[in-house]
Amino acid sequence: MSRLPKVTVTFLLFFVFIFLFFGAARSQDTDVSKFPTGPINFITSLPAGSVGDVSSRLISKEAEKTLGKPVIVVNKPGGSHAIGATAIAKAKPDGYTIGYVTPSALFTVPFFEKLSYDPVKDLQGIMQYSETRFGVITGPDAPFKTFKELIDYARKNPGKVTYGTGGTNSIANINIEKIAREEGVRFTHIPFKGGTDYQTALMGGHVMFAAGEISAPMIEAGKIRLLLLFTEKKLPEYPQVPILKELGYKTSYPSFIGVMGPKGIPEGIVKKLEDAFTGASKQPSVVKGLNDLQLSAFYRSGRELTEFIAYHYDLYAQLLKEMNLIK
């Protein structure tokens, strides 16, 4: 029986040691009882100062008290919100990278761009704590005071009405173009990275209206005017502002603010995160913060949020086919 050379034995022992070392490290990484052992990155695909960004910071600050480690909010705007979504979807599924993925990055952009993530296969819900309020806004000096007047103005000035959204093929962009088709008018779209950017452009006169996230403080201050709400029900704060179905528009605008992570996070860690953020959403500081932002509190569990995403992904696939935007 031949003996292995000493060099070969040494290499074998070395690789066994490496395997055991990193195997133990991986085991510690996913040890539910020890989670978290370090900071958690919370990625948001929105610019700093936007409503979604501010609410993410509010709830993260409270959640870290339960988790016992810092929850660091990191802004990754751009790409119609797909940059931030990609960072979350492609992160190691260990619970240390989570965040907020906007509806556009889930329900429209993936159908138009070759992305490195699949909204249904690569992402999972952790919990939802609010619903975003989207709508159509304009400046106080715009030549139209209502959405009907906006349509009439666009009809008389084809192609001259410019509008901003959070990105090309975002949900706001798709819905405005759907309305334009139904009304037989033509707008000129200018994409931005997020709400703070297109609101600034709106006040500077660079666009005539914008669609997407709305800012209650700016509306109350008279800096912008709200013309239309993309909500299922009337909002008591804006009883005079119509919602989509009141004007006869049959379209869906799914909205949510929540916490998501890459698919494959161990169930025990997901449970810890879900419990921490759910508890945080009930704290007085978060409740008051959401009220100040005029955001509606709305809870979904991680499982319910995952199902909500899968349902609306299929719904938008059908909608985009009906609009002949995809095959």
Image: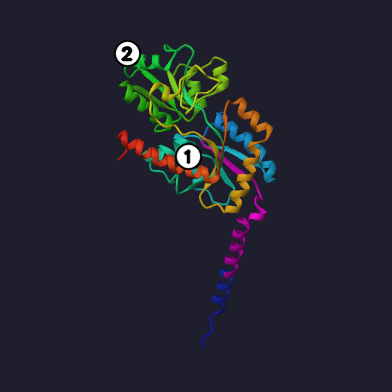
Q: Describe the element under mark 2 as helix, strand or loop.
A: helix
Residue at screen point 67% across, 38% down: 62
From mark 2 to mark 1, how far is it between C-alphas?
38 Å
278 lies left or right of 260:
right
Could you tell me which quadrant the C terminus lies in?
Answer: top left
- Depth-wise, is mark 2 or mark 1 nearer the camera? 2
- Classed neighbour count for the residue bearing mark 1: other residues with Cα under 10 Å, few (<14), some (14–19), many (≥20): some
Q: Amino acid at mark 2?
A: Lys
Residue 235 is situated, as x and y percent measured from the top left of the image, at 53, 23
- Classed neighbour count for the residue bearing mark 2: other residues with Cα under 10 Å, few (<14), some (14–19), many (≥20): few
Residue at screen point 39% across, 39% down: 315
Mark 2 sits on what residue? Answer: 156
174 lies left or right of 263:
left
Of residue 95 and residue 131, the one placed in the foreground of this image is: 131
Residue at screen point 42% across, 12% down: 144
Q: Eyeballing the image, is 152 above or below 76?
A: above
Residue at screen point 42% across, 11% down: 143
Q: Describe the element under mark 1 as helix, strand or loop.
A: helix
Indicate whether residue 38 is drawn in magenta: yes
Mark 1 sits on what residue? Answer: 83
In which quarter of the view is residue 129 placed? top right
Per the rendering, the mark at residue 241 is none
Residue 98 is situated, as x and y percent measured from the top left of the image, at 56, 44
Marks 2 & 1, CB-CB < 8 Å contact: no
Residue 109 is situated, as x and y percent measured from the top left of the image, at 41, 37
Indicate whether residue 24 is drawn in magenta: yes
Query: Which residues, given as a range, are shown in magenta?
Result: 16-45
In which quarter of the view is residue 126 placed? top right
Mark toward the start of the polypeptide (2 vs 1): 1
Q: Amino acid at mark 1?
A: Ile
